[in-house]
Image (cartoon, grey):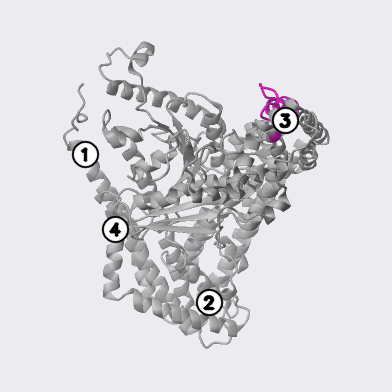
Amino acid sequence: MAEMKDVFGQEPHPDRSWTHPGVLRCFLEHRLKCSSVVEDDLYKEPMRKRRKSDRDQRFRAFPSVEQSALKEYEKLESRTRRVLSNTYQKLIQSVFLDDSIPNGVKYLINRLLALIEKPTVDPIYIGLFGSTGAGKSSLINAIIQQAMFLPVSGESICTSCIVQVSSGCCAQYEAKIHLLSDQEWREELKNLTKLLHRTEELGREEADAWNRDEAVEEATWKLQMIYGNGAESKNYEELLRAKPKRKIPTSRVITLKAEEAEELSIKLDPYIRTQRRDWDGEAAEMHIWPLIKHVEVTLPKSDLIPEGVVLVDIPGTGDFNSKRDEMWKKTIDKCSVIWVISDIERVSGGRAHEDLLNESIKACQRGFCRDVALVVTKTDKLHLPEYLRERKAGNQAIQSQREAVLERNEMIKLQRTRILKEKLKRKLPADFKVLEASDLVYTVSAQEYWQQALLTEEETEIPKLREYVRKRLLDKKRRTVTKYVTEAFGLLLLTDSFSSTQNLPNEHLHMSVLRRFAEEKVELLEKAIGQCFACMEQPLQEGVRTARTSYRYILRACLVRSKGNQGFHQTLKAVCLKNGIYASRTLARIDLNEALTQPIYDQIDPVFGSIFRTGRPTGSALMPHIDAFKHSLQEKMTEIGIRSGWKYDSCKNNFLIQEISAILGGLEDHILRRKRRVYESLTASVQSDLKLCYEEAAQITGKKACERMKDAIRRGVDQQVAEGMFERAQERMQHQFQQLKTGIVEKVKGSIATMLTLASSQGDGLYKELADVGSEYKEMEKLHRSLREVAENARLRKGMQEFLLRASPSKAGPPGTSL
């Protein structure tokens, strides 16, 4: 049973220990009481009305056609949960006084409980990924229709941490500010004081360079904000004893609430803004910004952003603090959509913009991201005389600023779409879904959205982004409910078969045939997985060869600055203190481990993406082989079912078919979670090999310390490369692939064996007389059939909407604009 729990993502829970009847009885008694209360309260008429009202409010961000589809899916899911709850109550009542509970019933109760408690739809995280001043906060403000809700970056301010904005079910505006724990701050404090350690051995020139170092300024500022002026000269032990300028809440969470958006914005402002060091009007709350890990903002029900969508303002570089930097990477990886934000003046070049695009593409490889788009902001900025002088495209004369802005927007879309597609094709498989997207580039103007002096609301493309968000949520709701109802139907099929006394001739023989068939197919699946992963061998070897020949050049590019060591002395020390990685709010991210392994990633990226893609069953794709395995089992089950006397739509046959889909659906989630570990194994291996080298360099102080640190790093890397550093990284990735293959096969074997044992009526002590759940089964059968009707209704509504739009008169030109 443990295998089945893992496949469905269920963690062991004390309440779910079935080793002793007394434990089970206490558990069932508790659950029965809870379920009775829920059942009594849930279906009272006043509550039903309130629930309907709440549901309508939640969907008000959608057009009427999409609202109808969502309501149908919500209704379908709600009724399914009710059927599962009723079935669960009947089962626990039927076994309540038994001293011995059959394994099959234990399994069934576990599965029912897990499905009842399963959340409706996991949030869709949309990451807005951009440098300071790119316009992320302004874009979020426009999307949520709150002009100055989040701080808009200017010359003196910027958003200092990750900020998540979502629409909730409450009537108030609320923000939760999460702070670093005491241990997390102690770790950063230790590194900050090491970074600021001065020595009398520095020469005057080196001391000047030290003082101009960006990392030093950042560390000094953080300590001064928490402990006051002079904190930068104190050691770690002294600062531990020092009293912060402002009291830090012991809960490490600050909750702010307000009735209006403007009120919450004012309260929230000093926590998430980072002011310039010479700004004198700082609020008391500003003193704790170095301790803030991330901020969660919840809006009331919105007409614009539906519940279940989280917009995430992600700073462009991460953070020197290990926990915040780790959260930065994890936040990027959990986003299913990433919008790379770049303003119109910086979109055509610049290292920061390219770094953000590369990081987003890596998120497609290692995380859950499936869509990447470039959002070009501030597109209303245009100097007309200069544009007309440099304009090369188009024969039509430009008559106005508006025409120039629209023409330039179209040119940027065409140009950047082509460049972005080429970049994605080099890194991702040719049939990756994002390459088929009709819109890869959006040109937006938050300022024009509010003013509409030049452009209409539609032309600012803010509504277009909202529409994209809604469609993503609607599609996810459809897929989630379909999977949920299908899995629930499988459980009711199993429950109904438990009550069956049918004992067909030769059934044991037929189940034995099915077991042997499943074992053979598992062996074939294991070979297919091995062949998929074997596709990595050649690109890995080529990447290692390239890395060995180019690592010195790469290292030189990372360590040598055009201005010499000025402003780089302590930054390099920070790199060493953090095992080869330095991320600040202002500097470009430095990651020596990633840079050294980049030649390997350049070789493996297309193949890696091909392995974990979904689509056509090719030799290198993993999931299509698992799907083929599923279909072959289902076909064999149908064949044996017909031969053994089961009807095509019998409980047993349908149970087997539905359950195998549920098992392999859980397996897909497991693979997606594990692929990040596989992908990052190269950099993790190199970082581990260079750890002693970094530690040695970090201890260097005195005269010429910067050059001596560089020499220590070069020597350490040379030595590790000579001893097989890149080859070890290759072996570590291959080992991770092997572990993934072993895990998949073991889960499939255990789950299929459990499923077939449950399906077999010959199992010793498996079945017993249970409560009659025939009515629940029939209702679940109807709900399962309704899935197709709901999908058909949605298609009909969409078709009618498109017809009406085509038949409607064309829209008039933008108001207040002379053409």
Q: Which residue is mark 3?
A: 207
Q: Is residue 242 above or below residue 651?
A: above
Q: Closest to the observer: 620 or 424? A: 424
Residue 774, x across and y down, in percent: 38, 76
Mark 3 or mark 1, which has the lower sequence index?
3
Can you say which quadrant of the picture contains the C terminus? top left
State left or right for residue 717 relative to residue 733. right
Can you say which quadrant of the picture contains the N terminus? bottom right
| SS of the residue under disc 3 | helix
Return the mark for residue 57: 4
| SS of the residue under disc 2 | helix
Q: Residue at x 67, y 49 (%)?
A: 189
Q: Which amino acid, mark 3?
A: Ala
Q: Which amino acid, mark 2?
A: Val
Q: Which amino acid, mark 1?
A: Leu
Q: Closest to the observer: 335 or 426? A: 335
* Tag nearer the camera, 3 or 1: 3
Q: Which residue is mark 2?
A: 105
Q: CA distance from mark 4 to mark 3?
A: 62 Å
| SS of the residue under disc 4 | helix
Name the main secondary structure of what is drawn in magenta.
helix
Mark 2 or mark 1, which has the lower sequence index?
2
Observer able to see residue 555: yes
* Tag nearer the camera, 4 or 3: 3
Q: Residue at x 29, y 32 (%)?
A: 459
Mark 3 or mark 2, which has the lower sequence index?
2
Q: Is residue 796 above or below residue 662?
A: above
Q: CA distance from mark 1 to mark 4?
A: 26 Å
Q: Which residue is mark 1?
A: 805
